[in-house]
Image (cartoon, rainbow, N blue to C red):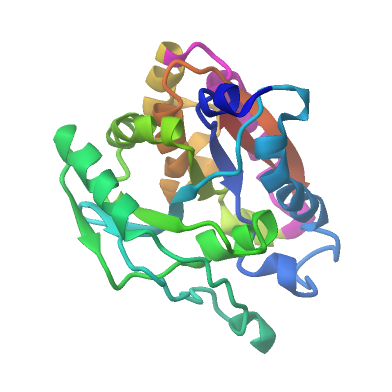
Amino acid sequence: MTTSETDRNPLPTLYIPHGGGPCFFMEWTMGPADTWHKMEAWLRELGASIYSGHGQKQHRKPDAIVVFSAHWENDVVTINSSAQPPLYFDYYNFPPHTYELTYPAPGHPELASTIENLLSDANIPCRQDAEHGFDHGVFIPFLLIYPEADIPIVQVSLTTSLDPAEHIALGQALAPLREQNVLLVGSGLSYHNMSALMNGPESSAGTESNAFDRWLSEVCEAAPQERNKSLGEWKSAPSAQLAHPREEHLIPLMVMAGAGGEDRGKTIFKDQVLGATVSAFQFG
């Protein structure tokens, strides 16, 4: 495939799991020691797989990345426009060395302004924030995906409404970035009932997560119009509110589905974590 052909392929959008705190960079003691090993290995391979294509569509390495993390909400969509974003160690009671991790990926103020323009054109209220840093929903997975930290990242907030339709529309407004070799990533966890997970083998996490995961996989792989309608009504899915007592870890998926446009989704990763099924999805 020639470079010009590669350039014409819009990058996919991705919804990825970011684990639990700094789980990939410590000895895990809140369950089996290998709890996060499969997810860690998959994230380490993800970066190269995006542009190698593995016999499918080929892309150039992304010129920039836009990330929606479950760990940043604001009253309106807020765009990190810092040129050198700091890190927020927004996890607690983990080993001291996990608060010394570094990920010096640059920001991209110009891209932040482009995002603001796209959202404004779509009548989505937004603002820039030149002081905000990367939370662990960004730097923890990207330490594995692109450890060189050589690709600029712009983090964009969710809104406190956590409204599915609003976030699907947010993704739709940013879909043109895919044509500009910008990778759009939603970072969360497809099952996020932490109290059930921490209850160990006696919990209901397995049954709940299996029912919800089957529904979620079918919906993400459905035709786009049906997909977006179903995601907008996610609370009626089997075990939905048991899987997500609060939906901030699911909402980044809505953004990625919206940005996926007319591309069908596919399940690209599935794992069992502390008894629960978690999945990752790609659109495009």
Residue plotted at (38% across, 18% down): 229
Q: Which of 282 and 275 is in front in this view?
A: 282
In the picture, which quadrant includes the N terminus? Answer: top right
Residue 20 drawn at (x, y percent)? 63, 62
Using residue 153 as the reference point, say whether residue 36 is left or right of it: right
Q: Does the magenta stretch include residue 24?
A: no
**The quadrant where residue 213 appears:** top right
* Dominant secondary structure of the residues highlighted in magenta in the image: helix
Q: Which of 36 and 8 is in front in this view?
A: 8
Residue 274 drawn at (x, y percent)? 75, 54
Using residue 176 as the reference point, say whether residue 76 is left or right of it: left
Residue plotted at (25% across, 65% down): 129
Q: Is residue 201 magenta?
A: yes
In the picture, which quadrant includes the C terminus? Answer: top right
Which region shows up in magenta? 200-224
Q: Which of 200 and 212 is in front in this view?
A: 212
Residue plotted at (48% across, 49% down): 65
Q: Is residue 246 visible?
A: no
**The quadrant where residue 107 appears:** bottom left
Residue 132 drawn at (x, y percent)? 33, 70
Q: How many labels does the image show?
A: 0
Q: Nearer the viewer, residue 129 or 152?
A: 152
Q: Can residue 163 be seen in this view?
A: yes
Relative height, residue 250 to residue 136 (above, below): above
Residue 75 drawn at (x, y percent)? 20, 55
Using residue 40 as the reference point, say whether residue 158 is left or right of it: left
